[in-house]
Image (cartoon, grey):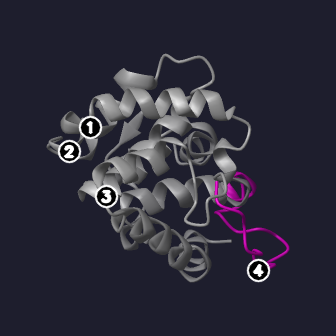
């Protein structure tokens, strides 16, 4: 798959889902409700998000307690980076809470407060996809990516790099095109 094909497939198959998910968080009735659902990693239907399915509920309840205690700081964060930093400082050192969970919770809370990522944050599978493109660190400015990614928001780039990491890895040696030429089936969110 070429980078254009990867981005096109992401836009077609994933963007509608992720856009709806963030709108659901943006439409929570109050800051405390948004923080609660984000901290407990619940979907709109009340189920646990796949990324956090293995985290014990009691631990996520502790996460919620900590984040509710700084609700006013979260609401006044200047941008997503500041909000992410607050969440990381508050829960990042809790055993069982990793960088992916910190990012996901920050992203969900950010949707409520109107704070979208301006950088691409690297964790888990995203780091694998970024590494294929020669990018490391904890986050990066999306402007350094090849042109096809310009059609995606930073949070979508994060998602795309994770979902399509195998295609990127497979394409690293053949100009980002798989020899089979097969279309990529719908991938679960990373």
At horizontal 53% and vertical 18% (from top left) the residue drawn is 94
| Dot 3: element | helix
Q: Within the image, what quadrant is residue 125 found in?
A: top right
Q: Can residue 121 be seen in this snapshot? A: no
- Residue behind mark 3: 112
Q: Nearer the viewer, mark 4 or mark 3?
A: 3
Provide the major secondary structure of the magenta segment.
Answer: loop
Residue 23 location, x and y as percent?
40, 71
- Callout 2 environment at 10 Å: few (<14), some (14 to 19), or many (20+)? some
Q: Which mark is residue 71?
A: 1
Q: Earlier in the sequence, mark 3 or mark 2?
A: 2
- Callout 4 environment at 10 Å: few (<14), some (14 to 19), or many (20+)? few
| Dot 4: element | loop
> For residue 187: magenta?
yes
| Dot 1: element | helix
Asked if disc 4 and disc 2 are in contact, CB closer than 8 Å, the reply is no
State the extent of the magenta-drawn residues as a range. 169-190
- Residue behind mark 4: 183
At horizontal 54% and vertical 32% (from top left) the residue drawn is 61
Residue 11 location, x and y as percent?
52, 78
Task: Compute the Cα span from label 4 to label 3.
Answer: 35 Å
Q: Front-most of 15 and 148?
A: 15
Residue 55 location, x and y as percent?
68, 34
Q: Can residue 153 be seen in this snapshot? A: yes
- Residue behind mark 2: 75
What quarter of the picture does the N terminus occupy?
bottom right
| Dot 2: element | helix
Task: Compute the Cα span from label 3 to label 2.
Answer: 9 Å
């Amino acid at each position: 798959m070429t980078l254009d094909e990867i981005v096109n497939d992401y836009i077609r198959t994933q963007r509608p889902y992720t856009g709806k998910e963030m709108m659901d968080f943006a439409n929570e009735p109050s800051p405390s409700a948004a923080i609660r659902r984000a901290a407990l990693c619940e979907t709109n239907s009340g189920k646990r998000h796949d990324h956090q399915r293995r985290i014990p509920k009691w631990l996520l309840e502790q996460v919620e307690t900590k984040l509710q205690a700084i609700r006013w700081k979260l609401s006044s964060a200047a941008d997503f980076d500041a909000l992410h930093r607050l969440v990381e400082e508050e829960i990042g050192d809790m055993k069982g809470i990793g960088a992916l969970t910190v990012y996901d919770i920050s992203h969900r809370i950010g949707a409520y407060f109107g704070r979208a990522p301006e950088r691409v944050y690297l964790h888990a599978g995203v780091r694998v996809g970024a590494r294929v493109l020669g990018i490391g660190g904890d986050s990066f400015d999306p402007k350094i990516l090849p042109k096809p990614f310009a059609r995606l928001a930073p949070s979508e780039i994060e998602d795309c790099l994770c979902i399509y990491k195998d295609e990127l890895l497979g394409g690293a040696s053949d100009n980002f095109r798989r020899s089979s030429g097969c279309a990529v089936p719908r991938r679960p969110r990373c």
